[in-house]
Structures are given as structure tokens and as C-alpha cells.
Image (cartoon, grey):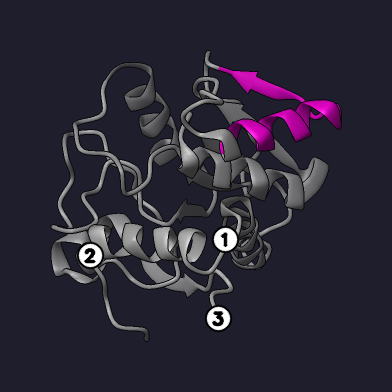
Amino acid sequence: MTRAISVAEARAIDRDAVERLGMPSILLMENAARGVVEHARRLGERFVVLCGSGNNGGDGLAVARHLGPACAIALLAEPDAARVPDAALQLRILRAAGRAIALGGAVPSAAAGTVWIDALFGTGLARAIEGRAADWIAAFNAARGSKLAVDVPSGLDADTGRPLGSACVRADLTVTLEAPKRGLLLPEAAPYVGRLEVVPLGLP
């Protein structure tokens, strides 16, 4: 396995790819999504993805596009185009294609055997999750079917391996991007991370 990195190192890798190598950040998001989709399809044929309003949610929206109509999409809140333009672009593409997106509200219901994908919060989270987002995580954890987290289980500190609060996703599989984050490998993170897989971002 690739050496484990801190959250700060992961951000530096992304920044270097964009600024020094000239890779568009949307390309990194697309590469991440394709890697996640490959693992998701090994778990089942029907999907629900829960997306937040940041770049982790953008990853989830891209995943939903690649998975096609077999994937139901729930979006916690609209991404701010000025702050997270790639996530906002992914949403615009899905809407232009006529994909149904449940905004806010309750988590969609799904039949047993559906694969649940967590793309609510990524490594940028630094506070306990409350309110509607916490309700979504509770519904995710209670759902029947395999559970996959994108990059890091929502609510988990990727450096310490500990939940930031009482609301934290419990995944069967975490598909992390480019390199494992240090906290994901710690014993206390195991109940939340499940099995850990790493997908590359296509860096040269």
C-alpha cells in the first residue's frame, strides 16, 4: 500500500497537481469518481449516493453520473459555485441531463441490497456534524445494504482516526483517494472505515 499521508499532505498533493503540473481540478474529481465507481459496482447494481455541498459531495455527484440511472441522488445543500466550482459544475451537468436530485429533506428509501455511498463530508471537516446532516448519517448507518465511503467516512477525523462527534458514518468499505490518510489505518478507525481501498488520481 502507498505510504500513509496526513490531511495537510493530501491537500498539498492536490495543490501541486493543479498549480505545478497544470492538471485541472475537475480532472482530479473525474479520476476519483471513476475509481470509486469501479469499487461500487463490485458491491451491487443499485445505488443511493448522499452528497454534501463541498468537493466530497462533488465527487459523489460525479460518481452518480458515472453510475447512471441505477443511482439515486440525495443532495444535502447546493454547492456554492464561487467556493467549490467543480462540485457546482457536476450538479449543473446532472440537472442538464435531467437526472432527479432530492435536495435536503429526508434520505430516499431504497430496497434491501442497494449500495449506499457516503459523499457528505471529506477531509476538510473540522467540527461535529449536527442537524439534518447528522440525521442523514443516522439513516445511512441504519440502511440495509453495503455501505461505501468516499475518501473518508463522514464525521471521522482522517488524521486521528476518531469521530469528531456522535454522528459518524460506519462504512463497510472506504475508497480513499491517491493515498491512505493516516487516521484511517489506526485501530480506533476500523469500525467506521471497514475495508480500505486506495484509488489513484492519475498523477504522473
The quadrant the N terminus occupies is bottom left
How far is disc 2 from disc 3 in space, using C-alphas? 20 Å
As drawn, 179 above or below 77: below
Q: Nearer the viewer, residue 32 or 111?
A: 32
As drawn, 138 above or below 27: above
Residue on which the image places disc 2 = 6
- 170 displayed left or right of 175: left
How far is disc 2 from disc 1 in space, using C-alphas? 18 Å
Can residue 143 be seen by looking at this rendering? no
Give the mark nearer the N terminus: 1 vs 3. Answer: 1
The part of the image, by quadrant, that contains residue 102 is: top right
* Disc 3, SS: loop
> Percent from the top left, x then y, of residue 193?
32, 60
Residue on which the image places disc 1 = 32
> Percent from the top left, x then y, of residue 160?
13, 57
The part of the chain drawn in magenta is 87-103
Q: Residue 5: within the magenta?
A: no
**Residue at 59% over, 17% down:** 103
